[in-house]
Amino acid sequence: MKRIVLALIACVLASGCGMKDIDKRFYVVTTGIDMTDNPEKPYRISLRLAITAARVESGSSRTEIQTVDAPSIAEGVRLLKSHVDKELEFGHCRMFILGKSLLEKATPETMSWFSRRRDIQMISYFGVGEPDALAVLKVEPKSERYPGNALFLSFGNEGTESPYTITTFLFDLVRKIKERGIDPILPIIRAHNRTYVIDKSVVANKQGQRLFLSAEETQLFKMTSADSSKSELVLPMEDGTRVVMYVSQIRTKVRISAGDAPTVRLKIKVSGVLEESAPELLEKDWHGLEQRMGQRFSKQVEELLVKLRDADADPYGFGLRYLAQHFGKDKEFKAWEASYPEAKFQVSTDVRITGPGVIR
Amino acid sequence: MIEQMRAEFGDSKDMVTEVLDNGFSRLELCFFPGMCDIVQVKDAILVPFSYRFDPDEFRRMLKTGLSFIESDEPKKWPEMLLKGCVLLQYEEKVYSFAAIRKMQKEPGNTEVEASLQGPQSSFTEDLDMNMYLLRLRYNVPSLTAEQLQKGELSGTRIMVVYDRLKVDGGSLDELHKRLDKIRPKLIQAAGQLAMFIGNTRFSMFPITLQTERPDRVAQLIQRGKIAILVDGSRFAVTLPVRFFDFMHAMDDDYEPYWMGRIIIFFRYLGMILSMTLPALYIAACSYNPEFFRVQLAFSIDGSRAAVPYPSFVEVFIMLFMIEALIESSIRLPRFVGSTAATVGGLILGQAAQQAGLVSSIMIIVTSVVAISNFVIPNSSFSYSIRALKYVFVLVATFYGMVGIIVAIFLIVVYLCHLRSFGQPYLAINLKRDQRQSQQSR
């Protein structure tokens, strides 16, 4: 008996103060960070807070937005705690939106707040808000069941699997900001009526320049860098019709041959089903169609690669791959950096159309 | 003899003492009619003595009859009478005649360890019937039985049964040592004896297995275990046992292999859930809400909004209710039992949540805990798990998720340390271990 009492007392004395019931916490579902013009308080922190309900219906999600200007992100969040009645909890905040203005001015050190906080999960998604983060936060999608769920579902493969949506996780972003030879790429989220449009992206290189990619370029990048299927291959015909192939499988192999001017070879294998084409097109020239589609795709990819090279951006991580093939010392990286602007690209695409998608 | 016995039993009125005289000779008779089979007494003593009397034949019968034993030690007479023997004095010699009344004429039905397709017969409260059931299933000459008598007041007959070719000598010695040491006053049930020999006061888990199924005992004996049968109890105590024996239902051996494995897997899952789920609820609700998926977190958050108390109070309220419900449905007479279940189910299912006393998720947690506790095939083991649940709840209240993980680790350590009559409790494959240890010797 004495022992049990002693153990109980020890438990009470040694227990921490981390206990806070779930209903005494305010869940942040989306965090947005913008730049203000005020040099005293350059950061505008906006939090989208979930108001939970026991019963869940479509479109029933209710949220509250709190905004504050602060000299730093950490201070801003502390300040925001005094605006709300419950403890702020970032454990379920899986979406962080950086304003376009912030992206242009911010330093890598800005990111360290996210990776340092204990309750921010490293698998949270990052995106760029257009025109600014607050505008994106203010969108309340009609179909949203849970607060903030619409954005969570847009990324990853949980909900929609769009070939235009780039998914960047916090751990990946932090790694790419620090790593030599690879640059982070972030999706651009635009508020459009009551929904989000996420089809463009932006590459941030180490020199602080930003390169914006259009929707088509984003799709090309996602197909070739992440082997993302469920995308499409298009070939406009001479008579104005378009042949559209559904890509069910895509594999990309990258090889870098060293030399004075390094050559990057991309070997892409695509297979899929025709989703839209003129009748009897395949029977006429199956192999020729495949070749033409491949050539067009190679050309598009090559143009994208050249554009990235000219902007001195490397979201594919060619530099990292080059270092992996060499000794990975500073000298090699300097050599790569010097030769990357002259790098040549050779893209060859092997398209295989498995069928017209219907049985005659 | 009659006077001596009358004096010994204080002239107890339920003892019959009679002097029979058939004209040729006298027979003194002394027995408890309540403990004897009166038909046997009539057929074996009264009929030969009265209308078919032949002095030579009667004497011969007394000398050679299987159930007639000459006993010339007056000290043993009371004991024999108490066991249900008839004492008779004929021609200055005292004989005892075993006409013990048997309450049980046929094997019982399995009640605690029901089986779908396995044998439906179970042990009875009669030791001889139990021995018959066991010999029937384990029919070899090497099956050894040792009879003992324990209990100063109850004088309960105890049978220690094992296969002498397969039994583990160390465990048997240990058992003998412990049986010699104990001096209980009354032994009413096998579980009581198990407690006496298994120093369960300091053990969180049972180290002997009680079963009412003869087929299980036979299977355990075949694996070299020892069974203890207690007169007056329909349970056999088997030892030494492992952790995994408690999670084994006899149906596992009677059903197709893979189906059985899947069921066993679910049983272990049920055990872990019933042990840790309330604790996990506390830890996840109060310490680590990021543990849930976002949807679940929000709905728990929403449903807890009306709950006035912190999560651990909520858990204690519900656990108390469910324990009270289980306990009452065991103790209540069968006619009232269903009422308790209905009332309790209503309270637990709806009212408590609508009153805002507990969250709706907590109701699911409670029912999962209660149901999955019944999945454990052995009742004393399920008691252990039921009790351990509170250790986890307590630890989770103070330390959250980290506490639960540490507690699980400590329990595994404790199980590794535990021994059942010299055998490791958490041994995965005892046979292989034994073989290896024999080879190394």
Image: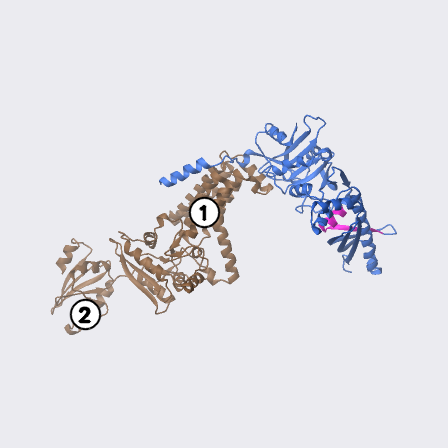
On the question of residue A305 being in view, the answer is yes
Q: Residues within 10 Å of mark 1 (few under 14, many from 20)?
A: few
Residue A34 location, quadrant: top right
B270 or B290, which is in the foreground? B290
B291 or B232, which is in the foreground? B291
Instruction: Tell me: residue A242, above or below residue A28.
Output: below
Chain letter of the brown region: B
Q: Amino acid at mark 1?
A: Leu
Residue A117 falls within the magenta-colored stretch: no
Q: Left or right? Give the position of B418 relative to A327.
A: left
Query: Which color is chain A depicted in?
Result: blue
**Residue A215 position in % (x across, y down):** 77, 43
**Residue B248 position in % (x across, y down):** 45, 57
Q: Residues within 10 Å of mark 2 (few under 14, many from 20)?
A: some
Residue B302 location, quadrant: top right
Q: Amino acid at mark 2?
A: Leu
**Residue B313 position in % (x across, y down):** 46, 37
Looking at the rendering, the stretch of residues picked out in magenta corresponds to: A219-236
**Residue B122 position in % (x across, y down):** 38, 60
Q: Secondary structure at mark 2?
A: helix
Q: Left or right? Give the position of A187 relative to B437.
A: right
Quadrant in which the C terminus of chain B appears? bottom left
The image's mark for residue A120 is none
Q: Label 1 vs label 2: CA separation?
A: 66 Å
Number of residue marks? 2
Instruction: Tell me: residue B429, above or below residue A233.
Output: below
Q: Chain of mark 1?
A: B
Disc 2 marks which residue? B62
Q: Secondary structure at mark 1?
A: helix
Q: Chain of mark 2?
A: B
Disc 1 marks which residue? B410
**Which mark sits nearer the N-terminus, 1 or 2?**
2
